[in-house]
Image: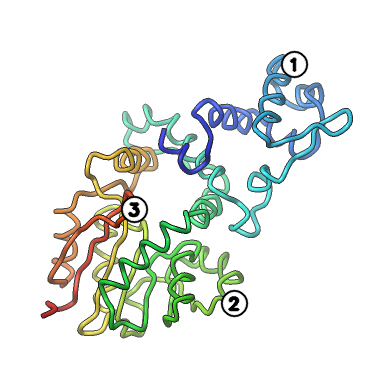
Amino acid sequence: MPMRDRTGLDTEALLLLWAARETGVLDALLSSAGTAAEVAAETDVTREAAETAVQALADLGFVERVRDGYEPTNRAIGLLAKRDVRSVGALPHALDELDLLVDLPETMETGVPPEPPDDWSVNRLGAHAATDDAAVRSAVTAAVHAAPEADRVLDVCGGSGVYAAEFADRGYDVTMLDDAETVDRVEPMLRSRGVRLHPGHPADLDGPYGLAFAGGMLSRVDPAEARSVLSGVADALADDGTVVLVDTVADGSDAAVAASVCGLAAGHGGASDSDEIRSWLRDAGFADVSVDAVPGTERHAAVGHKRTVD
């Protein structure tokens, strides 16, 4: 199951955590209950189920034995803390995705996904902030190679800001764009990194930018939104500007299948194939379009230039 790569947990462990969250066992154990008996008393699970679940959570390192009961460990911080997305980690969002996947049969029949789980937005940002450092560096390096003369960067749908921060650390003048809720949540931790933040659509920005970058944006939105964003990006770029979209491409890989299934479960997004992405870029006014693998990762970099580069 692809989620293991993000969380380090087997399918069975993820399902246990999901079931513990759904039944209230996790909330009880991480807040008020210190023993399996107290967990059973505060929830609707049986005493036997509570004992098995608590022991398994202890074996997984989410709680530890302290005298006659159990207390949360540092590994459980992401299940408790929501103020700073850097403390959330990948696990809560993996459980949210599992929540949607459980409802996938009904979603496939009705075409209507369930309401996202509580804390969906902050958990998604937590998973984004937990993106592997090497993957972030590889994506930014691919973008830099595509636009070596650029000095102003626009990070589109920048999420937690891990890519924007990497560009800033490399000396670029960076503006990160996302919705107002996301910008408000991540602004405190990006302020010191020299990243400017702007809520809204790329077309609302005063350019020009030499490079527009998006990491994982295409696989989270529908084609119509992707086209709208790329049109706005073209408006924000300088006459010789470049756009680089680093994302999962529909190439038959496990990552592509996972992205498409999660998109189906959520009701939007999924992996698109290279030809489709190229057509979006061309329709937005970009030329010299290419889609190539990013070395050392399962992702590709789709590159378009606002005018053909000689």
User: What's under tag 3, amino acid-wise?
Assistant: Gly
Mark 3 or mark 2, earlier in chain:
2
The residue mark sitting in front, 3 or 2, is: 3
Q: Secondary structure at mark 1?
A: helix
- The reply to whether discs 3 and 1 touch (Cβ–Cβ < 8 Å) is no
Say which quadrant the N terminus sits in.
top left
Between 116 and 57, the one nearer to me in the picture = 57
CA distance for labels 3 and 1: 47 Å
Name the residue located 89 percent from the left edge and 31 percent from the top edge: 67
**Residue 35 picture quarter:** top right
Q: What is the CA distance from the residue labelled 3 to the residue labelled 2?
A: 30 Å
User: Which percent across, then down, holds residue 4?
Assistant: 47, 37
For disc 1, the marked residue is 47
In this view, the residue farthest toward the front is 296
Mark in front: 3 vs 1: 3
Q: Is residue 147 left or right of residue 122?
A: left
